[in-house]
Image (cartoon, rainbow, N blue to C red):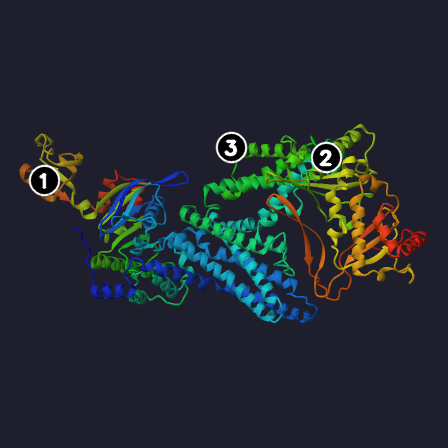
C-alpha cells in the first residue's frame, strides 16, 4: 500500500502540491489523472524517492520512502523522459539492473523482449519512442517490483502494444499483487484497466474513487408522477438528490445511492414513469468535478 | 471489492514456482542490492568511460615515457649526477593527470545535470551515499590508473640509475596527490553546479582560477596600501592553494626533483592528502543534501548562488581596479601623499568591474539575461556596502597599517632586503646582482630596534619627498633609489612585510641606516664564515676597486708570474686569511666603514667543490616556521658535470681599516705583490673589469 498524507512540494517558491492525500491499495491499479502541470510527475517522483517532500508523508508498505534502499528495491519507476537509457542497449541495461535489484528476473525480461520483438544489442537511442518505452517497461517489470510507477507510459504506443503492456500490468497485479500507479492526462486510457482513479488539478486532489463505486452509486433518473401537481410533497426527500431539474411533468434527477435503494423507493412511491439511466464515466466525472470545464474535458479526453 | 478485467489466454504466464525460484537465484536479502550496487556501478562507469583512461595512457606513452627513454642516454654515472626525465616529460605527466582528473569528474557525475537521468539514478535501490562513493571511486580509478601505470614504466626505465628509485618515488607520490586533489575539487564543483558547462567552469575555477584571483586581490591591496608588500614568495600563500603549485615550487613535478626546503615533500603530501579527503567529505555531504529539482540549473544550492555572485563581483572589482588603476602608474606617489592618496582611476575601475561581473554572474545563475529585478538590486546593494568597507580598508590608511612600525619588544625576528644593493661604504663584498637575493636576518633587541628606527625614518623621508614635490622645489627625477623591504616576525605569531623605494642620498646620510648596516646581525651575515664557510676556500681573483659599481676587477692577464699569489695560498692559509678578514669586518663601526678610504684591493674568495660533493652558497629562499623567519643555506647539486668553476664566490674589500688582514698578508710575504698588482691595474684601466 502507498499512503500519502498532506503531501506538499515547493519548487523555488511555487507550491506544486498543496497537501495531497492519496491511498493506493495493495495490488490495485491506480490511475492518476490530471492536466499538464497538475503535479502527477511530482507525486510519482516523491513516491519513488527522487524528490524530497516539503511537507506531509509518503509511506510505502508502512515505511517512509526517502533514501530507503530496501523500499526502492521493491519499486520500479518508469519516467516520461527515457534519455538515461540512450547510452545503453538492452543487454547492457539488463546487466545494470541485474546488479542493482535483488529480485531481477532475466527470463522474464527475455520473454517480454522477445514478445515485443526488440533487439538486444542495438543502442536504445536508436529505438523509436514506442520501442524505448517497451524496452524500459520490460526492464522494469523484470525487477519483479511490488510497486510499479509509470509516468505517462502509454503515450506514443500503438493500440496493440498498449494492450500488451496493460495485460502484463494486470497479470502481475493479479498473480503477485503488484501495486501499480499510472499517470496520464487521459481518462479514457485508464478506464478499462484501473480500479481506482485519482484526479489532480493544480496540485490538489479533486477526486479519488474506485471506479466501480463511482459508476455504481451515481444514477440519473427520469421520474414523472403525471401532472406536476400530483407529485407528492417531499417525494424525493428519501433520496440523496444531487441535482434536480424538470422538463414539463418529467423530473430529471441525479442521485447518489445503491440501485436497490432506488428500486425500493420506486416501489414505495409508484411514479408513473421511472427510468434509471446509466451514467457514462464521462458524465460521472463532469458531475463530480463540478461541471464541464476545459480541465475536465481534457481529462475525460473530449 | 477489487475488479480485475478479464484477460485473454496470452497473458502473463509466470507461475508462483518460477517467481520463487528466480527470487532465490537473485538473492532475497535486503543487503544484497547494496553490496552488489557498488561493484555494479563502478563496473558500469568504467565500462562507459574507460576511453578517458586510455587516452591518458597513450598520451603519457607518446609524450612522457618515450622522451624519458631518450633522455636516459644523457646520464653519466661517473660524475655522480642524476639525470632525470626530460623536463617536458615530467610536466606532461602532471598536466595529463590534471586534465584526466577534471574530465573524469565531469563524466561520472554528468547525470547530476540532467533531471531525467538523475530521476532514474536516484530511483534505483541505491542510497545517495553509495551513488556518490561508487561514482567517486570510478572516476578516481579512471584518472589515476594511467598515471600510476606510466610512472611504474618510468621507474622501470630508470631503475638502474643510482638514486632514481627514491626520486621517481617522490615524484609519483607528489603527482598522485595532485591528481587526487584536482579530482576531489572537480567532484565538488560538479555537486554544486547544475549543468555540464557550469561544472567544467567551476572545476577550472576552483582548481586554478581562484588562485589567480587571490593573487590579484593581494596585488590590489598592495597597490592601495602604501608600503604593504605581500609579494615575497615566502609570504605568498598562493603557492599553497593547489598542490600543483606547491610541488612545482618544490621542483618535484617540473625539473630535477631536488626538492626545496621551503616546500617540504612530506608536509605537502600529508597536508594535501588530508585536504583532499576533507573536500571529498564535503562533496559527499553536499551530494546527500542535493535536491533533484535543482538539476539543470546553473548552481544546485541557493547558498552557493550567493557566494558565486558575490565572488564574481569581488573578482570583477579587483580586476577592474587593477586594470584601470594601472593608468596612474607609479608616478602618483611623487605627486601626492602616499598615505592619504586614493587613486580615482582605481576606484572607477573597481566600480565598473564589480557591476559588470555582478550582472554577468546573475545572468549565469538565472540562465537568463533578464536579471534587473528588485532582488538583484537588493543583492547588489549588500555587496556594494561590503565592497565599500573593503575598499576603504585597502585603499586608505584608516586601519593605520601603512604607518605601523613594530616596536622591538613586539618582534621575535626581523629582516631587511635591499634590492638595489647595500650602499658603499657599508657593503662588504658581494656583487650588485647578488645583493638583490638576500634577506639579511636581524636578531637581538638592539639590532631589531635599529631596523625599526630605519623603518620609521623611511616613512618620514617619504613624507618629506612628497612635500618637496608638492611644493615644486624638486621632483627627485635625478635621484637614485633603492628598493628596501622590511620583514618582521612578531611574537603574536603574525608577520609583516613592507616595501619602499628610498632615496640613496637619504640612506647615505641616515644614522639609522648606518646603525643597521654596522649592526652585529648584518656583519655576521656578510662574513666569509656565513656566506662561504671556512672549508675548502680558495683565493680566486685579486682585483682593484674601480668605480663604486664595479668593485671587483679581474687581474687575469695583468698578473705576472712573480706577483701571482693565488696558487701560493693553501686551503689552511686561505682559511686564516678569511678569519682575519672577518675579524676586521666585525670590528668596524659605521664610522670606520665610512672613513675607510679607498679600497686597497679586492680579494675574491670562492668555496671550492670537493670532488663528488656539493657547493655551499646562500640561497634567497625564505621560509617561515612558527613565528620566526629562518634563513637557509641551500646545498645544491651541480647539474652540469663538466662545470669546473664554482657557481658562487664573493669579493671582499680590503681597506686601510683591515689591519689584521694586512698584517696577515705581510706576515706571509704576499702583501706587496697584491698591492703592486692592484696599483698597476688601477693605473692601466680602472674601469675595465670582469665579474
> Does A225 appear above or below B189?
above
Q: Residues within 10 Å of mark 3 (few under 14, many from 20)?
A: few
- What residue did someone put label 3 on? B378
Position of B96 with respect to A110 (left or right) is right
Q: Mark 3 falls within which chain?
A: B
Q: Nearer the viewer, residue B180 or B510?
A: B510
Please identify, in this view, whether the residue under mark 3 or under mark 2 is nearer the observer.
Answer: 2
Q: Mark 2 falls within which chain?
A: B
For label 3, the SS is: helix
Residue at the top extreme, as displayed: B471
Q: Mark 1 falls within which chain?
A: A
- What residue did someone put label 2 on? B453
> Does A57 appear above or below B392?
below
> Does B105 appear above or below B640?
above
Quadrant where the C terminus of chain B sits is bottom right
The residue located at (70%, 36%) in the rendering is B449
Return the x and y of residue A171 as percentages of the image width and height.
23, 59
**Do the residues marked 1 and 3 share a common chain?**
no
Q: Give the label on residue B452, or none.
A: none
- What residue did someone put label 1 on? A273
Residue A227 occupies which quadrant of the picture? Answer: top left
Tell me if I can see residue B689 in this picture.
Answer: no
Distance of label 1 from label 3 (alpha carbons): 73 Å
For label 2, the SS is: helix
Amino acid at each position: 500500500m502507498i499512503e500519502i498524507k498532506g503531501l506538499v512540494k515547493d519548487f523555488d517558491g511555487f507550491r506544486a502540491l498543496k497537501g495531497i492525500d492519496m491511498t493506493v491499495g495493495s495490488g490495485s491499479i491506480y490511475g492518476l489523472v490530471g492536466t499538464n502541470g497538475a503535479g502527477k510527475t511530482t507525486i510519482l517522483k516523491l513516491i519513488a524517492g527522487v524528490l524530497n517532500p516539503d511537507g506531509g508523508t509518503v509511506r510505502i508498505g508502512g515505511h517512509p520512502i526517502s533514501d530507503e534502499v530496501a523500499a526502492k528495491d521493491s519499486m520500479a519507476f518508469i519516467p516520461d523522459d527515457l534519455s538515461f537509457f540512450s547510452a545503453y542497449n538492452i543487454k547492457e541495461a539488463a546487466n545494470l539492473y541485474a546488479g542493482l535489484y535483488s529480485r531481477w528476473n532475466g527470463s522474464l525480461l527475455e520473454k517480454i523482449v522477445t514478445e515485443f520483438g526488440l533487439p538486444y544489442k542495438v543502442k536504445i537511442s536508436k529505438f523509436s519512442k514506442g520501442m524505448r518505452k517497451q524496452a524500459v517497461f520490460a526492464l522494469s517489470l523484470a525487477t519483479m517490483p511490488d510497486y510499479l510507477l509509470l509516468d505517462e507510459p502509454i503515450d506514443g504506443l500503438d493500440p496493440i502494444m498498449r494492450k500488451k503492456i496493460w495485460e502484463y500490468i494486470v497479470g502481475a497485479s493479479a498473480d503477485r499483487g503488484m501495486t501499480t500507479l499510472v499517470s496520464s492526462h487521459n481518462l479514457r486510457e485508464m478506464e478499462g484497466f484501473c480500479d481506482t482513479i485519482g484526479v489532480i488539478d493544480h496540485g490538489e486532489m479533486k477526486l479519488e474513487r474506485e471506479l466501480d463505486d463511482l459508476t455504481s452509486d451515481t444514477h440519473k433518473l427520469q421520474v414523472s408522477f403525471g401532472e406536476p401537481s400530483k407529485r407528492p410533497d417531499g417525494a424525493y426527500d428519501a433520496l440523496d438528490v444531487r441535482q434536480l431539474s424538470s422538463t414539463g411533468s418529467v423530473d430529471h434527477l441525479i442521485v447518489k445511492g445503491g440501485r436497490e435503494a432506488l428500486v425500493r423507493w420506486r416501489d414505495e412511491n409508484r411514479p408513473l414513469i421511472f427510468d434509471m439511466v446509466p451514467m457514462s464515466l464521462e458524465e460521472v466525472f463532469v458531475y463530480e468535478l463540478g461541471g464541464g470545464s476545459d480541465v475536465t474535458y481534457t481529462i475525460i479526453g473530449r | 471489492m477489487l475488479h480485475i478485467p478479464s484477460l485473454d489466454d496470452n497473458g502473463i504466464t509466470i507461475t508462483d514456482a518460477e517467481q520463487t525460484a528466480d527470487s532465490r537465484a537473485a538473492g532475497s536479502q535486503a543487503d544484497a542490492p547494496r553490496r552488489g550496487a557498488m561493484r555494479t556501478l563502478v563496473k558500469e562507469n568504467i565500462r562507459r568511460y574507460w576511453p578517458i583512461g586510455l587516452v591518458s595512457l597513450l598520451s603519457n606513452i607518446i609524450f612522457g615515457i618515450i622522451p624519458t627513454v631518450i633522455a636516459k642516454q644523457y646520464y653519466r654515472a661517473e660524475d655522480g649526477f642524476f639525470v632525470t626525465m626530460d623536463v617536458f616529460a615530467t610536466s606532461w605527466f602532471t598536466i595529463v593527470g590534471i586534465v584526466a582528473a577534471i574530465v573524469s569528474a565531469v563524466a561520472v557525475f554528468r547525470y547530476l545535470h540532467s533531471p531525467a537521468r538523475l530521476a532514474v539514478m536516484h530511483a534505483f535501490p541505491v542510497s545517495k551515499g553509495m551513488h556518490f562513493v561508487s561514482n567517486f571511486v570510478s572516476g578516481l580509478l579512471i584518472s589515476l590508473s594511467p598515471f600510476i601505470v606510466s610512472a611504474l614504466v618510468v621507474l622501470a626505465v630508470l631503475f638502474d640509475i643510482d638514486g632514481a628509485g627514491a626520486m621517481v618515488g617522490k615524484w609519483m607520490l607528489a603527482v598522485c596527490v595532485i591528481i587526487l586533489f584536482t579530482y576531489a575539487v572537480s567532484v565538488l564543483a560538479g555537486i554544486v553546479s547544475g549543468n555540464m558547462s557550469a561544472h567544467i567552469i567551476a572545476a577550472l575555477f576552483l582548481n586554478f582560477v581562484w588562485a589567480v584571483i587571490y593573487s590579484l586581490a593581494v596585488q590590489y591591496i598592495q597597490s592601495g596600501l602604501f608600503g604593504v608588500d605581500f609579494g615575497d614568495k615566502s609570504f605568498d600563500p598562493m603557492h599553497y592553494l593547489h598542490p600543483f603549485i606547491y610541488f612545482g615550487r618544490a621542483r618535484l613535478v617540473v625539473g630535477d626533483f631536488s626538492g626545496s626546503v621551503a616546500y617540504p615533500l612530506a608536509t605537502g603530501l600529508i597536508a594535501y592528502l588530508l585536504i583532499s579527503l576533507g573536500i571529498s567529505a564535503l562533496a559527499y555531504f553536499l551530494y546527500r543534501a542535493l535536491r533533484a529539482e535543482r538539476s539543470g540549473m546553473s548552481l544546485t544550492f541557493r547558498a552557493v548562488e550567493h557566494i558565486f555572485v558575490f565572488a564574481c563581483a569581488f573578482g570583477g572589482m579587483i580586476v577592474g581596479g587593477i586594470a584601470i588603476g594601472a593608468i596612474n602608474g607609479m608616478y602618483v606617489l611623487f605627486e601626492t601623499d602616499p598615505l592619504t592618496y586614493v587613486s580615482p582611476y582605481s576606484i572607477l575601475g573597481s566600480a565598473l568591474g564589480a557591476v559588470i561581473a555582478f550582472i554577468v554572474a546573475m545572468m549565469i545563475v538565472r540562465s537568463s539575461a533578464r536579471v534587473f529585478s528588485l532582488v538583484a538590486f537588493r543583492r547588489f546593494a549588500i555587496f556594494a556596502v561590503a565592497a565599500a568597507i573593503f575598499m576603504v580598508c585597502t585603499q586608505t590608511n584608516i586601519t593605520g597599517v601603512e604607518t605601523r612600525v613594530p616596536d622591538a619588544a613586539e618582534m621575535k625576528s626581523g629582516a631587511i632586503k635591499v634590492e638595489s644593493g647595500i650602499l658603499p661604504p657599508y657593503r662588504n663584498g658581494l656583487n650588485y646582482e647578488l645583493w638583490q637575493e638576500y634577506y639579511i636576518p636581524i636578531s637581538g633587541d638592539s639590532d631589531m630596534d635599529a631596523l625599526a628606527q630605519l623603518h620609521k625614518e623611511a616613512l618620514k623621508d617619504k613624507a618629506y619627498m612628497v612635500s618637496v614635490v608638492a611644493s615644486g622645489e624638486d621632483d627627485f627625477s635625478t635621484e637614485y633609489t633603492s628598493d628596501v623591504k622590511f620583514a618582521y616576525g612578531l611574537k603574536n605569531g603574525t608577520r609583516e612585510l613592507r616595501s619602499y623605494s628610498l632615496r640613496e642620498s637619504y640612506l647615505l646620510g641616515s644614522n639609522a641606516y648606518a646603525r643597521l648596516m654596522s649592526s652585529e646581525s648584518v656583519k655576521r651575515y656578510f662574513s666569509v664564515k656565513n656566506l662561504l664557510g671556512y672549508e675548502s676556500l680558495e683565493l680566486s681573483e685579486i682585483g682593484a676597486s674601480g668605480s663604486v659599481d664595479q668593485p671587483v676587477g679581474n687581474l687575469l692577464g695583468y698578473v705576472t708570474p712573480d706577483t701571482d699569489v693565488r696558487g701560493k695560498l693553501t686551503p689552511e692559509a686561505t682559511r686564516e686569511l678569511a678569519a682575519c678578514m672577518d675579524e676586521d669586518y666585525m670590528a668596524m663601526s659605521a664610522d670606520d666603514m665610512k672613513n675607510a678610504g679607498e679600497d686597497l684591493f679586492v680579494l675574491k674568495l670562492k668555496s671550492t667543490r670537493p670532488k663528488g660533493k656539493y657547493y655551499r652558497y646562500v640561497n634567497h629562499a625564505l621560509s617561515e616556521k612558527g613565528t620566526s623567519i629562518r634563513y637557509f643555506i641551500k646545498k645544491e647539486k651541480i647539474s652540469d658535470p663538466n662545470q669546473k668553476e664554482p657557481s658562487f664566490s664573493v669579493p671582499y674589500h680590503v681597506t686601510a681599516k683591515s689591519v689584521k688582514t694586512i698584517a696577515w698578508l705581510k706576515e706571509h710575504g704576499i702583501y706587496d705583490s697584491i698591492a703592486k698588482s692592484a696599483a698597476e691595474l688601477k693605473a692601466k684601466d680602472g674601469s675595465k673589469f670582469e665579474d
